[in-house]
Amino acid sequence: DTGVSQNPRHKITKRGQNVTFRCDPISEHNRLYWYRQTLGQGPEFLTYFQNEAQLEKSRLLSDRFSAERPKGSFSTLEIQRTEQGDSAMYLCASSLPDLNTEAFFGQGTRLTVV
Amino acid sequence: AQKVTQAQTEISVVEKEDVTLDCVYETRDTTYYLFWYKQPPSGELVFLIRRNSFDEQNEISGRYSWNFQKSTSSFNFTITASQVVDSAVYFCALSEAGNTPLVFGKGTRLSVIA
């Protein structure tokens, strides 16, 4: 296993379309996190999972955002009815469940809404 | 509420110079964890170090060193004899006890010029 994998790496979509991103964590990692990063800013936490359970979703930016991790392995992040303000880098990270252990990040999916 | 401040937006140094990146944090917890990540142009966040709030001993790893001072709520990062490959954006992050997700600063862009 070479690390956290995210697909696609780049996505260009028209405003109003739905998009879905996939994240495959490091295989033995139970925790999976989604972050958003805009230009010149640090990553902003969106949501996270412990196995298939979504432990925090109040930080999702709006009800257009949703995430799933149905079998406790890979996860998807969906944005419905995209807006230009959704243009950003979406980062996935995974970690072991040990207390405050470090998270390992994927290379991200860069979304451009035109 | 937890917060991380990286006051230096951009730093430019000549190769072989030493450089210190500042990080100031805010938290109400007595138990917390501090991290540094590197984000090279490829975009993937690379973990550098984790330090818990009960361990104020400074750490050195090769050309990298970290100075943790609880009295000033700072966790500064020094690169000795900088190299061009050190050019990246560096993020400081905080996680409170209970395995809360990371809160990142806005990052410091370091440019090392040959």
Image (tube, rainbow, N blue to C red):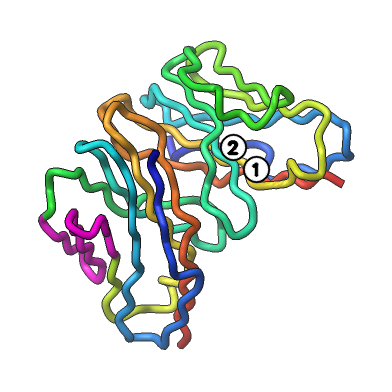
Q: Reading the chain from its start, which is encountered first: label 1 or label 2?
A: 2
Q: Are marks 1 and 2 in contact (CB under 8 Å)?
A: yes
Tell me which chain the residue with mark 1 is part of.
A
Question: Dot 1, crowdedness within 10 Å: few (<14), some or many (≥20)?
Answer: many
Q: Please, what secondary structure does the residue beneath circle 2 have?
A: strand
Prevailing SS of the magenta stretch: strand
Which is nearer the eye, B95 or A110?
Answer: B95
Percent x, y for residue B19? 33, 77
- Give the vertical position of B40 relative to B34 (above or below): below
Percent x, y for residue A24? 53, 29
Which residue position is annotated with label 2? A6
Percent x, y for residue B47? 36, 50
* Distance (Cα) linking label 1 and label 2: 7 Å
Question: Dot 2, crowdedness within 10 Å: few (<14), some or many (≥20)?
Answer: many
Percent x, y for residue A42? 52, 52
- Give the vertical position of A87 relative to A24 (above or below): below
Residue at 34% x, 79% y is: B82
Tell me which chain the residue with mark 2 is part of.
A
Which residue position is annotated with label 1? A109
Residue at 32% x, 49% y is: B35
Residue at 25% x, 39% y is: B32
Query: Over which residues does the magenta segment extend?
Result: B57-76
